[in-house]
Image (spheres, grey):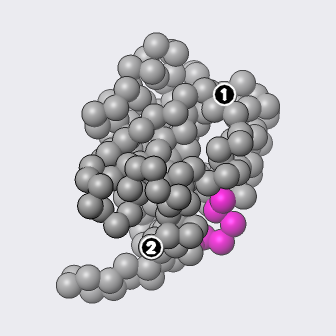
Amino acid sequence: MKRALLVIDVQNEYFFGKLPVSHPPGSLPNILKAMDAAADNRIPVVVIQHAAKSDASPVFRKGSPEWELHPDVEKRRRDVLIEKNWPDSFAETRLEEWLKANGIDTLTVCGYMTQMCCDTTARRAFHLGYGVEFLSDATGTLAFENEAGSVTAEELHRAILVTQGRFSRVMNSDDWVSRVRSGVNQA
């Protein structure tokens, strides 16, 4: 088994922009802990950065301060930076090509948002035949409301983690770091 850590959309938009992530508390430190453990254990780190398809979009406008990677992610080691325009990190990107070229068969998902880009990427990875690990406390979201109703950030996060159990091995970042450090190679 050869893992890669996917760090999805850890961008300023989720901290200083229109979409402030609120749950779970501590998701950013857990993402950074996973990045550090990956670096210490020679696990490739794939940082994925979302860009709006149109400059008219009020969020993730390429070149804006909100589009930029969070400074703590920006300064850490990464093996590749992949730009995407869709919730699925594989759609119209070079992600799969890079994974195949590097012999990766297992993906560990962390980042934002739990129910959008993390969930979509994890499901796609599963359908493509990758083993998938989903870090429960190193993904995050916020409350949503629309014509269908409303959901708290905690409820939304928990529901995705429960349903991800079909596609991924869901675990917290401490368990993942322990497994990585002990050399456990089972997704």
Residue shown at 22% from the left, 82% from the top:
148
Residue 53: x and y in percent read 27, 49
Q: Residue at coordinates 32% horizontally, 83% vertically from top-left?
A: 145
Q: Is residue 175 magenta?
A: no
Name the amino acid type tagged 1: Ile
> Which residue is at a point 34% across and 67% down the rendered structure image?
58
As rendered, which of 24 and 160 lies closer to the eye? 24
Question: N-terminal of the two: label 1 or label 2?
Answer: 2
Q: Residue at x 40, y 50 (%)?
A: 62
Task: Answer above or below: position of 128 versus 140.
Answer: above
Q: Is residue 154 above or below residue 10?
A: below
Q: Main secondary structure of the magenta part?
A: loop
* Residue 93 in the image, given as x and y percentages of width and height: 34, 32
- Look at mark 1 in the image and give the residue it sits on: 43
Q: Position of residue 81 (x, y in %)?
A: 52, 33
Circle 2 — which element?
A: loop
**Residue placed under numbered mark 2 in the picture:** 18
